[in-house]
Amino acid sequence: MSERLRLLCVHPHPDDESIACGGVLARAVDRGAVAAVVTCTGGEEGENLAGIDLGDEDLATHRRRELADALRELGVEIHEWLGYRDSGMADTPANAHPDSFAAADPDEAARRLAGIIRRLRPHVVVSDDAAGTYGHPDHIQAHRVTVAAVALARDAGVDVEGLPPWAVAKRYVHTLSKDNLLRAHTALLEAGLASPFGDAPASGPEDLPFGVPGDQVTTSVDVRPYLARKQAALRSHRSQIGEDSFFLNIPDDLAEGLFGREEFVLEDGARADDPATGRESDLFAGLSG
C-alpha cells in the first residue's frame, strides 16, 4: 500500500490559510492526502471588522475558534501554533513587542518549525514569498523561517527535539500573478464593482502594487470544485471577513475566474510540468503516494 502524501501550509495569521491555500487544502483532503496547517501568530493585532460582540473574550481567543471552524470547513484535521504574537502592519508599535513574530529570533523560530516538520513529515510545504505578498512583517518572517526550517529539518547533523531528519520533497511559495490580477481588476470595474486596486483602469500589469509576472508562476491549481468550501472557510473568520467582504460578494459568474485557481512558485524541489500547459497543475506533481 502506498504512503499517503502530506501537505503542510505555513501561514502568519488565522484567515491567511483560507485566503491563500483554502482550495489546495480542501483538494488535498478530497484526494486522500494529509493536509496540515501551521499558524505562526494568534492574530492579536487584527481588527474586529465585523463588530462582533466579544463579551469578555479577547480577539485572539475568538480568532482561535474562527480558525478551528475554517479548518473544519476545509477538512483539515492537523493544526499547530508556532507560538508567536501578531506583529501588526509594518512600522507600527506592535512590531517591537517582545513576543512578536517579526521581532523573534529567526533561528529559534526555524527550530520550532523544523520540529513540526520532522514530526509531520510533509512531502510538500507552502509558505509566503520573500516579499510577504504585500510586505507585511509577519508574512516576510514566515517565508524566512520556513526556508530555514525546511533546510534544518533535512540536516542529519542537527538535533531537533531528538527527531529523525526529514527531507521535504517540494517547497513552494503561494503567489498571485499580475496577469490574473489585472484581469480580475478589469472584470470588476467592467461589472461596476469595487476593485481592491481602486477605481482607475490599469494600463498594464506593472501598474498593480503586488503580484509577480505570470511567467514566474510554476504551478497553477484548478480549485473551482472547492470554491464553496473555500468561501465557507472564509466566512468562518467572521471578525476579519465580514458579509460585505470583497471575497464573499463576487457574483457567481466572476468568482470562478477570480478565485478558481491558486498559484504558486516552486522554490525547492523537482518541477513536473503538465505537457499541455508547461506548468504544474498539482502541488504533488511528480510525487507518488
Image (cartoon, grey):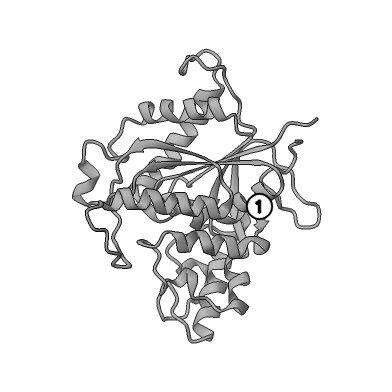
For residue 154, what is the image quadrant? top right
Whether 3 is drawn above or below 127: the answer is: above
The spot of residue 193 in percent (x, y) is: 47, 82
Q: Quadrant of the N terminus?
A: top right
Q: Is residue 152 above or below residue 200?
A: above
In this rendering, does residue 131 appear at all? yes
Q: Tell me where residue 184 appears, x and y as whole percent.
A: 54, 73
Residue 258's place in the image compared with 124, above or below, is: below
Q: Around disc 1, counting alpha carbons within 10 Å, would you say few (fewer than 14), some (14 to 19), or many (20 or more)?
A: many
Residue extending furthest toward the left: 93
In the image shown, does 228 or 246 lie closer to the viewer? 228
Q: Nearer the viewer, residue 90 or 10?
A: 10
The structure residue drawn at horizontal position 40% and vertical position 76%, both measured from the top left corner, is 198
Residue positioned 55% across, 55% down in the render? 73
Q: Is residue 127 left or right of residue 262?
A: left
16 horizontally vs 2: left or right:
left
Q: Secondary structure at mark 1?
A: helix
Q: Is residue 152 above or below residue 145?
A: above
Quadrant where the C terminus sits is top right
User: How many tags in the picture?
Assistant: 1
Residue 284 screen position, x and y as percent: 69, 42
Residue at the (41%, 75%) spot, across then down = 244
| Residue 177 in sight in this render | no
Amino acid marked by disc 1: Arg
Query: Residue 177 location in percent, x, y?
Result: 56, 60
- The answer to whether 227 appears left or right of 233 in the picture is right
Say which residue label 1 marks. 27
Residue at 53% over, 29% down: 117
